[in-house]
Amino acid sequence: NYTDEVIWNAFRLANIMLEEMDDVSIFLNGPSVKYESLDSIQFPLLELAKIFTLSEGQLFA
């Protein structure tokens, strides 16, 4: 699914940015708001979102 891959890439990039920057925010809108239900083996969205929030990233929806 295209949406799954887009969200996956957003979280991957955000986690990389958190390693280099102090403040990183993600604003989810449209289909990306339901990222929890789109989690899969191919696109582990829950794992990436957990890493993002535990690393003090800000998640808005």
Image (cartoon, grey):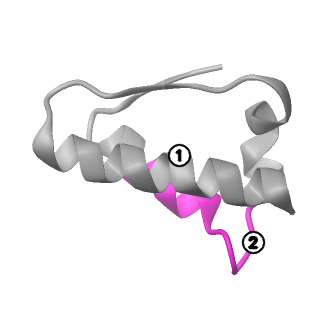
Q: Secondary structure at mark 2?
A: loop
Q: Which residues are magenta?
A: 39-51
Is 36 situated left or right of 56 in this image? right
Q: Residue at x 74, y 62 (%)?
A: 39
Which residue in the protein does label 2 denote?
40
**Distance from the alpha carbon under mark 1 to that under mark 2:** 16 Å
- Image spot of residue 32 (x, y percent): 75, 37
Judge left or right: residue 1 versus residue 45.
right
Up-down: is 1 above or below 41? above
Give yes or no for contact between labels 1 and 2 (Cβ–Cβ under 8 Å).
no
The answer to whether 57 appears left or right of 6 in the picture is left
Query: Three-letter amino acid code at disc 2?
Result: Ser
Q: Residue at x 23, y 24 (%)?
A: 23
Q: Nearer the viewer, mark 1 or mark 2?
A: 1
Residue 31 appears in view = yes
Q: Quadrant of the C terminus?
A: top right
Rendered location of residue 9, percent (x, y): 55, 55
Tally of numbered discs: 2
Q: Which residue bears the numbered disc 1?
A: 10
As drawn, 24 above or below 48: above
Identify the residue shown where x is 52% and y is 62%: 47
Sooner in the amino-acid sequence: mark 1 or mark 2: 1
* Mark 1 residue element: helix
Q: Position of residue 31 (x, y in %)?
A: 85, 35
Q: Is residue 8 above or below residue 36?
A: below
Write down the quadrant of residue 28 in the picture.
top right
Q: What residue occupies the far bottom of the structure in this picture? A: 41
How many residues crowd mark 1 within 10 Å: few (<14), some (14–19), many (20+)? some
